[in-house]
Image: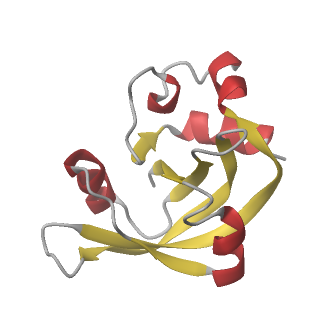
Amino acid sequence: MNYWLIKSEPSAYSIDDLKRDGTTSWEGVRNYQARNFMRDMRVGDKVLFYASSADPTGVSGLAEVSREARPEKDPAWSMVDIRFVKEFPDVVPLETLKKTRGLEKMLVVKRGVRLSVQPVTKGEYEIIAKLGR
């Protein structure tokens, strides 16, 4: 099993939208590295749902990969399906992630890393899931 963080602007698609929909196709990612990460996703992989361009930015809930990568209309790009798991009562803000021991190597806390899909470790996932309860 793998662990991932995916970013979305709440004005485009939020954890509330995913909760309402139950499952959605995650498409429109236009970065080759992020696309390649999506191609590595497997059914059952765990996902941290990150609200970007929000106040505060941070992890707003949990999801799970429910369908593996397949081509979009333009076959150069891929999409996966994700399924809602849990909405956190409060967003775990980026500032908290930056200050929490065990999360210092996460791509999301590094300056200049803006990937919308990124791998995380099992330990990082578990720390954030616990912070979100």
Q: Is residue 101 visible?
A: no
Total numbered labels = 0
Percent position (x, y) of residue 48?
A: 59, 51
Question: Residue, x 24% and y 77% (percent of image)?
Answer: 72
Q: Is residue 37 above or below residue 66?
A: above
Is residue 58 toward the left or the right of residue 42 in the image? right
Q: Is residue 91 above or below residue 15?
A: above
Q: Quadrant of residue 56?
A: top right
Q: Quadrant of residue 40?
A: bottom left
Percent position (x, y) of residue 13?
A: 57, 66
Question: Residue, x 49% and y 37% (percent of image)?
Answer: 121
Q: Is residue 63 above or below residue 32?
A: below
Is residue 119 toward the left or the right of residue 35 in the image? right
Query: In terms of depth relative to the viewer, which is nearer, 35 or 56?
Result: 56
Percent position (x, y) of residue 79?
A: 33, 71
Percent position (x, y) of residue 76?
A: 13, 67
Q: Is residue 116 visible?
A: yes
The image's colour scheme reads secondary structure
Quadrant location of the N terminus?
bottom left
Is residue 22 toward the left or the right of residue 120 in the image? right
Q: Is residue 124 above or below residue 10?
A: above
Question: Residue, x 36% and y 60% (percent of image)?
Answer: 41
